Image (cartoon, helix red, strand yellow):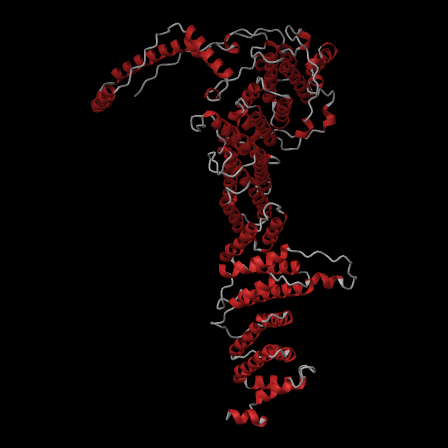
């Protein structure tokens, strides 16, 4: 009978009597011997565990209500010891009572009770249970511990302890649930949205150190009590346990927290957070974090430029760390997103609005902030590209180049003033990005480093009027060609008497490089030649041209390339002398100086004494009477120029006949050296908005048409009308039938006609073809000087006149 049992202690159940004897006096604490008896009883009769737990829970709730906190501590200590000792199948019912008591303590307003409940929960979290639990829920504990992490108690010491307890509680929840599939899924957004911000909050608010310095014995203890360090350890543990499918739920709250607290603009805390994340997760999950950041950057594409710049810099740090592990398929995705953001930023800067049109209610866009964001994007592209392997870097280079808008038939550009500005800014930003990626690029095979499709697009930008764009193209070419770190040695243009002081690293030209130059050398020479003729060139352009010529001579040169480069530089000298382009005085002096510097370099590289002597004589003559034609007087801050460059005496010029003579005696191709360099104009020039090239082409066509002996009057183009189109459609069927009948007759003729008739027919067609070819050659082809004319060789011996190819008689062709 309950009433009788309550009055007579001997009639109470044994577990109640043992529990009562464990806490006879709150001041004395837990009685050790009686606690051992209770533990032995629980282990001997595990079916009583649920009743023991229920009774302890009842007493604890009663003691909390009566403010008997000493008995509360004794009850929790008894529960802890029972938990540590009992691992039987009935432990689940006991745990329910235990968690109920912990929740009661956490609900209390007393900080000591909250800390006591947290400590008990942490001990429970470290216990590995033998039997799973299907119905246990930790939602309350996640919410309560997260709330404790944000404690704002007036007392600094108490506030620190409460926050520390909250972090430890969250750590215990994670340890208890993260690896148990039967427990509540801690990775659900409803839990991650509470856990992660709570840890970041404590990681962010690092308490200031006290004014008095702690003693050496207290310092380690003080460090352990720092909520920021504990929160960092907990966050690392949480992320380290994250599986592939849980990364997104763990990273999203971080991004939201940084957005809500405006932590992208200082960038320091955001970078620190993602360094913790990248070093904590498994390496194969790195690309998931990169994807999250890219998506967040797209989502904030209309945020302030400072916010986007912060996200980009965080992305840069994360990508560098991820590249050491596995970036996966996100490489091109990352570059595509960054380039898209770059174009959007250009639009924002031009229109002044995030909507693409100026409106009264639009946000004010600061152009300098957008420029800062663009530089951050370019820096990120370069820093990430340097960590990629060569094959991926090559793909990125091709990908960026494919995005550059070019004035070609296949890549139409925007028109109008705004469109031209957008095209120009886009070209500059993408070429800057390409320069960042190409810097330090090492590839032994130039054919793979500069494939045809990439080189064609890159060199087509070298024909644009914008001087800044042309300079970027030259620097990009220098970055690709320089494979031995020689480019900085040509940063200053000079005529050194001994180039050994430069300590150049020179290797023999490989077979792959020889093939590359045979395929692309004329294309490179043509663009160098045309770049030299630009009126808008400045000192840095000529320095880049000199560096490019020098690096080609060192990295890619064989005898044939050396000859062509000498011809090219002599042609540039002729441009300055003849001045058909009406170049300014500085440009002409710069071309003379550029030629002197390069020929001085190449003469010492070839080590031909007579060649070196001729170059030295001309340079010395210029030093005495024409210093304005040397780089030491031209490529300085205040160049010393001559006002009159007409009628330059021969002693100041490098003579092609003399160079071909001295090099011919050393085994170089003197015939080729005698031929003046003439660039080949292509369709690319017609699409390049350059007036000089367009006029040259039109002039060439006009001269050829006037010199044609069989000039025919142009037939006016037929006017296209509706009737014309209708007639063409109606007649198409008849034309197809006639063509089909003609083909049938030809096939039948060759199948049935005798051999003599077929031979006579083919002979007549061959003679007709030969006559037409002769007419075409007479009209369009001028005989080259070497094969058709008489040329004086290096030693004055005339060469025999050879028969031109088009005058040779070929045998008649016959079809059997």
- Pick the residue in front: 714 or 341: 341
Percent x, y for residue 597?
68, 19
Q: Is residue 126 visible?
A: no
Q: Residue at x 61, y 46 (%)?
A: 267
Which of the two residues, 717 or 788, is positioned nearer the viewer here? Answer: 717
Quadrant that contains the C terminus:
top left
Is residue 500 depicted above or below 145 in this figure?
Answer: above
Residue visible at 57% across and 27% down in the picture: 473
- Side of 33 where 741 appears, left or right: left
Q: Name, please, the residue furthest toward the right.
A: 215
Q: Is residue 61 above or below residue 223?
A: below
Left or right of 206 on screen, residue 246? left
Image x and y of residue 196, in percent = 56, 58
- Is residue 670 visible in this depiction of the protein? yes
Quarter-of-image position of residue 807: top left
Total number of numbered discs in the rendering: 0
Q: What x and y, as percent, mark residue 74?
A: 64, 80
Depicted 141 relative to depicted 259: above or below: below
Residue furthest to the front in view is 360
- Closest to the observer, 795 or 37: 37
Q: Nearer the viewer, residue 138 or 442?
A: 138
């Amino acid at each position: 009978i309950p009433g009788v049992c309550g009055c007579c202690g001997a009639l109470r159940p044994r577990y109640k009597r043992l529990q009562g004897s464990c806490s006879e006096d709150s001041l004395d604490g837990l009685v050790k011997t009686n606690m051992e008896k209770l533990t032995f009883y629980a282990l001997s009769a595990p079916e009583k565990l649920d009743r023991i737990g229920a009774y302890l829970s009842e007493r604890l709730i009663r003691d909390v209500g009566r403010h008997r906190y000493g008995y509360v501590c004794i009850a929790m200590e008894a529960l802890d010891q029972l938990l540590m000792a009992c691992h039987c199948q009935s432990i689940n019912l006991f745990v329910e009572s235990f968690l109920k008591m912990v929740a009661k303590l956490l609900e209390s307003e007393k900080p000591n009770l909250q800390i006591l409940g947290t400590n008990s929960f942490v001990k429970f979290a470290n216990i590995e249970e033998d039997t799973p639990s299907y119905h246990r829920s930790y939602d309350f504990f996640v919410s309560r511990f997260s709330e404790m992490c944000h404690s704002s108690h007036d007392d600094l010491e108490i506030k620190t302890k409460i926050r520390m307890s909250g972090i430890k509680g969250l750590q215990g929840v994670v340890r208890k649930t993260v690896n148990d599939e039967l427990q509540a899924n801690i990775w659900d957004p409803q839990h991650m949205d509470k856990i992660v911000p709570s840890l970041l909050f404590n990681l962010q608010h690092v308490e200031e150190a006290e004014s008095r310095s702690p003693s050496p014995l207290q310092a380690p203890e003080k460090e352990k009590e720092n909520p920021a360090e504990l929160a960092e350890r907990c966050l690392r543990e949480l992320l380290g346990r994250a599986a592939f499918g849980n990364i997104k739920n763990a990273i999203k709250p971080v991004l939201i927290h940084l957005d809500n607290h405006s932590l992208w603009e200082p960038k320091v805390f955001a970078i620190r957070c993602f360094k913790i994340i990248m070093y904590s997760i498994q390496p194969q999950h790195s690309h998931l974090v990169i994807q999250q950041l890219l998506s967040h950057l797209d989502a904030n594409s209309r945020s302030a430029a400072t916010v986007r710049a912060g996200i980009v810099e965080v992305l840069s740090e994360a990508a560098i760390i991820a590249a050491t592990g596995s970036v996966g398929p996100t490489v091109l995705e990352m570059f595509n997103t960054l380039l898209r953001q770059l174009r959007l930023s250009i639009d924002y800067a031009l229109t002044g609005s995030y909507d693409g049109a100026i409106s009264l209610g639009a946000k004010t866009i600061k152009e300098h902030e957008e420029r800062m964001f663009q530089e951050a994007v370019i820096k990120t592209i370069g820093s990430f590209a340097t960590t990629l392997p060569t094959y991926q870097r090559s793909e990125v280079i091709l990908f960026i180049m494919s995005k550059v808008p070019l004035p070609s038939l296949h890549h139409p550009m925007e028109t109008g003033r705004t469109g031209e500005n957008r095209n120009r800014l886009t070209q500059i930003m993408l070429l800057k990005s390409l320069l960042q990626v190409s810097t330090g690029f090492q590839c032994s095979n130039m054919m793979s480093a500069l494939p045809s499709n990439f080189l064609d697009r890159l060199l087509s930008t070298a024909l644009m009027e914008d001087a800044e764009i042309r300079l970027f193209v030259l620097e990009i070419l220098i970055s690709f060609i320089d494979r031995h770190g020689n480019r900085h040695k040509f940063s200053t243009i000079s005529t050194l008497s001994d180039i050994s002081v430069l300590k150049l690293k020179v290797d023999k030209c490989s077979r792959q490089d020889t093939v590359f130059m045979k395929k692309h050398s004329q294309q490179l020479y043509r663009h160098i030649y045309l770049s030299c003729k630009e009126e808008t060139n400045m000192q840095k352009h000529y320095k880049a041209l000199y560096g490019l010529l020098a690096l080609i001579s060192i990295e890619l040169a064989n005898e044939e390339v050396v000859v062509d480069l000498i011809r090219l530089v002599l042609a540039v000298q002729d441009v300055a002398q003849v001045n058909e382009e009406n170049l300014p005085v500085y440009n002409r002096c710069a071309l003379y100086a550029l030629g002197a510097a390069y020929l001085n370099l190449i003469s010492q590289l070839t080590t031909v004494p007579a060649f070196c002597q001729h170059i030295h004589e001309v340079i010395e003559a210029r030093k005495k009477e024409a210093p304005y034609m040397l780089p030491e007087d031209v490529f300085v801050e205040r160049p010393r120029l001559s006002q009159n460059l007409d009628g330059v005496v021969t002693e100041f010029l490098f003579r092609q006949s003399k160079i071909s003579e001295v090099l011919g005696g050393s085994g170089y191709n003197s015939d080729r050296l005698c031929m003046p360099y003439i660039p080949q104009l292509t369709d690319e020039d017609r699409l390049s908005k350059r007036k000089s090239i367009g006029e040259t082409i039109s002039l060439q066509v006009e001269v050829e048409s006037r010199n044609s002996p069989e000039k025919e009057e142009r037939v006016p183009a037929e006017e296209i009308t509706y009737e014309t189109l209708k007639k063409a459609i109606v007649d198409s069927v008849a034309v197809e039938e006639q063509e089909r009948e003609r083909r049938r007759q030809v096939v039948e003729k060759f199948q049935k006609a005798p051999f003599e008739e077929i031979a006579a027919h083919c002979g007549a067609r061959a003679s007709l073809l030969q006559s037409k070819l002769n007419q075409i050659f007479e009209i369009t082809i001028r005989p080259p000087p070497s094969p058709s004319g008489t040329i004086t060789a290096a030693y004055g011996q005339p060469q025999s006149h050879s028969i031109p190819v088009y005058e040779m008689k070929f045998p008649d062709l016959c079809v059997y």
